[in-house]
């Protein structure tokens, strides 16, 4: 039997979030709906989840000694990685000592490192992927590009949200792509993956839930990324029955290998009925923010429910929906989201403002959500709302 006692008492449950951005904030909210004490951690103060957590810690989560110190201090019932930049070998040690890591420490370790998850999928599970090579220095990199061929995609093996990612279209791009990858890695300069360019009809995120009820799938999420970072998503992405079945089979095979309970964002390329595996995140996915309006349980609610050991018997889909990321450019700690009465005037429109404390360059600061009779109508509605939004970037 699953029990949750009074919050912040010896019989209560405590969850420690490693990463406190907009996705972590929603997970924290859902955990608190079950009376779970939430401790939020991140590398900077005032992160979104910290604003609603019971307690917080600011430190570099790649510092293994500090990570262990905080976890031993808090003694959480659940350790929940919400970003890639974590000293995952320490999580593996702590799990062996009896701590509970969501979904597992090995899943966090494998998926933080693109090399680990790609080798698992392609070489151990036999799942189809794009052609790839890994490189540790510039000479290896040039050789990898030559073997894969141009055009190709270059990514640090440890990064997210498009950081360090580029496309080599001509030989003149090679040197700059190496530089971008070295500057964009989560853990600094290091090893990269060179991937063959996949010609696909569309790409999806298949949100896959592993719980005590078994494996459950959300309707496929279509999306558009710019420079590797999500800008638009919608649900459901139209697919043939054969393609959807293949996508679910691949997602189940990969997530079964990773193990544990929680939600996984499985990214796949679709060409006709052919499905090609790209990546997987063992946590809620940014493209999945559309589920905050499209389903009775969002991806965050599903993650919280599953990791607490509670059943996920079914997911009720409300209807075609879309999301539009609000990305702001500037260098400030003061922004205003303006004209909100017009943004939210149309029926079936919602908005989330993340509350991030500052911007340096460009940063996702909110999301607009819409639901309608068709995907096309939902996307158009979200875009109309977005175009009414006024963002005032004020000086520091």
Image: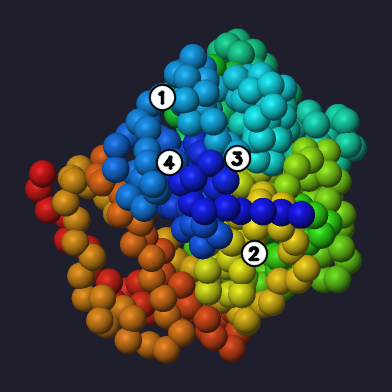
Image mark for residue 60:
1
Q: Position of residue 144 (x, y in %)?
A: 68, 21
Contact between labelled residues 4 and 2, with CB atoms less than 8 Å apart: no
Specify few, some or many for label 3: CA neighbours under 10 Å numbering under 14, 14-19, or 20 or more: some
Residue at 38% from the left image edge and 65% from the top image edge: 352
Q: Quadrant of residue 89?
A: top right
Mark 1 → mark 2, Cα distance in angstroms:
32 Å
Foreground label between 3 and 2: 3
In the rendered view, tell whether residue 147 sits above or below residue 28: above
The residue depicted at 10 percent of the width and 44 percent of the height is 396
- Reading the image, the residue beneath label 2 is 221
Query: Dot 3: what SS?
Result: strand
Indicate left or right for 162 with 306 as reference.
left
Which circle, 2 or 4, is nearer the viewer?
4
Where in the figure is residue 107, as x and y percent of width and height?
A: 71, 34
Mark 1 vs 3, N-terminal side: 1
The reply to whether the C-beta atoms of the residues labelled 1 and 2 are less than 8 Å apart is no
Local secondary structure at mark 1: loop
Residue tagged by mark 4? 40
Residue 269: x and y, percent? 72, 53
The span from disc 1 to disc 3 (Cα, nearest Å) is: 20 Å
On-image quarter of the N terminus? bottom right
Q: Nearer the viewer, mark 1 or mark 3?
A: 3
Give me the C-alpha separation between circle 2 and circle 4.
28 Å
Of the image marks 1 and 2, the number of the one nearer the N terminus? 1
Colour style of the rendered protein structure:
rainbow
Residue 156 visible here: no
* Image x and y of residue 268, in percent: 72, 52
Secondary structure category for the residue under label 4: strand
Residue under label 3: 78
């Amino acid at each position: 039997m699953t029990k949750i006692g009074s919050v912040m008492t010896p019989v209560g449950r405590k969850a420690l979030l490693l990463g406190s951005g907009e996705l972590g904030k929603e997970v924290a909210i859902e955990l608190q709906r079950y009376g779970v004490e939430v401790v939020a951690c991140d590398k900077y103060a005032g992160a979104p989840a910290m604003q609603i957590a019971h307690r917080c810690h600011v430190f570099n989560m790649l510092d293994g000694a500090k990570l262990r110190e905080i976890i031993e201090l808090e003694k959480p019932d659940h350790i929940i990685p919400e970003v890639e930049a974590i000293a995952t070998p320490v999580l593996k040690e702590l799990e062996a000592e009896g701590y509970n890591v969501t979904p597992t420490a090995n899943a966090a370790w494998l998926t933080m490192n693109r090399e680990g998850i790609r080798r698992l999928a392609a070489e151990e599970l036999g799942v189809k992927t794009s052609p790839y090579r890994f490189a540790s220095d510039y000479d290896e990199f040039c050789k990898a590009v030559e073997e894969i061929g141009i055009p190709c995609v270059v990514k640090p093996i440890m990064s997210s949200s498009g950081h360090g990612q580029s496309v080599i279209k001509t030989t003149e791009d090679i040197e700059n792509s190496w530089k971008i990858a070295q500057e964009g890695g989560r853990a600094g300069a290091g090893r990269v993956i060179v991937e063959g360019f996949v010609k696909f009809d569309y790409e999806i995120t298949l949100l896959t839930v592993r719980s005590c009820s078994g494996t459950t799938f959300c309707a496929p999420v279509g999306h558009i990324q710019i420079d590797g970072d999500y800008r638009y998503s919608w649900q459901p992405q139209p697919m043939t029955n054969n393609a959807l079945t293949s996508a679910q089979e691949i997602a189940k095979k990969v997530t079964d290998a990773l193990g544990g309970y929680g939600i996984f964002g499985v990214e796949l390329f679709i060409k006709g009925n052919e499905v090609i595996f790209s990546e997987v995140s063992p946590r809620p996915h940014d493209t999945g923010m559309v589920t905050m309006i499209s389903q009775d349980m969002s991806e965050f609610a599903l993650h919280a429910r599953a990791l607490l050991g509670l059943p996920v018997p079914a997911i009720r889909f409300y209807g075609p929906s879309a999301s539009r990321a609000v990305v702001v450019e500037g260098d400030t700690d003061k922004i205003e989201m303006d004209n909100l009465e017009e943004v939210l005037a149309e029926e079936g429109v919602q908005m989330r403002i993340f509350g991030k404390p500052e911007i340096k360059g460009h940063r996702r600061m909110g999301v607009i959500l819409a639901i309608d009779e068709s995907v096309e109508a939902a996307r158009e509605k979200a875009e109309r709302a977005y175009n009414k939004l006024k963002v005032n970037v004020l000086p520091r």
